[in-house]
């Protein structure tokens, strides 16, 4: 999985949990919570959807690594690729 594909996965999840958000101008290097009206429950929903849809586990200690789209990709791409290698 590429960084761009990973960012799309995250944006797709956000679109589902916060359908009123305009995701067309999300800056990849700015914290998501600074750009979007996401609260802590929305953020937890993102983590839960990553697990449910893709089998990606994100320990609570690593939540901070999902702050921006860029940091999401940096953290999640190796996890997605490790899962793909197992199958």
Image (cartoon, rainbow, N blue to C red):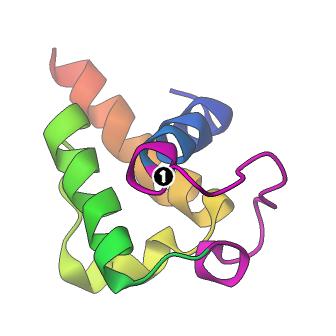
Q: Which residues are magenta?
A: 14-36
Q: Is residue 10 left or right of residue 33?
A: left
The front one of 57 and 34 is: 34
Q: Is residue 6 left or right of residue 22?
A: left
Determine the secondary structure under disc 1: helix
Residue 56 screen position, x and y as percent: 22, 46
Q: Is residue 67 above or below residue 70?
A: below
Disc 1 residue crowd, few under 14, some 14–19, many 20+, Cα 10 Å: many
Q: Is residue 36 above or below residue 33?
A: above
Residue at position x 47%, y 57% in the image: 18
Question: Splitting the image into 4 quarters, where does residue 59 fall?
Answer: bottom left
Note whether 82 is above or below 34 in the view shown. Answer: above
Is residue 17 rendered magenta in the image? yes
What's the magenta bit mostly, secondary-structure-wise?
A: loop
State the residue at coordinates (28%, 22%).
84
Q: Which x, y percent locates residue 14?
A: 48, 52
Which residue lies under the disc numbered 1? 14
Single out the residue that lies furthest toward the top.
87
Q: Position of residue 47 (x, y in %)?
A: 28, 61
**Quadrant holding the C terminus:** top left
């Amino acid at each position: 999985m590429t960084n761009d594909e990973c960012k799309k996965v995250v944006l797709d999840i956000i679109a589902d949990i916060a359908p009123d958000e305009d995701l067309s101008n999300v800056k990849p290097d700015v914290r998501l919570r600074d750009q979007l009206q996401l609260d802590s429950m929305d953020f937890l929903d993102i983590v839960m959807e990553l697990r449910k849809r893709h089998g990606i586990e994100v320990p609570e200690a690593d939540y901070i690594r999902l702050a921006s789209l860029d940091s999401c990709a940096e953290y999640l791409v190796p996890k997605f690729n490790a899962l793909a290698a197992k199958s």
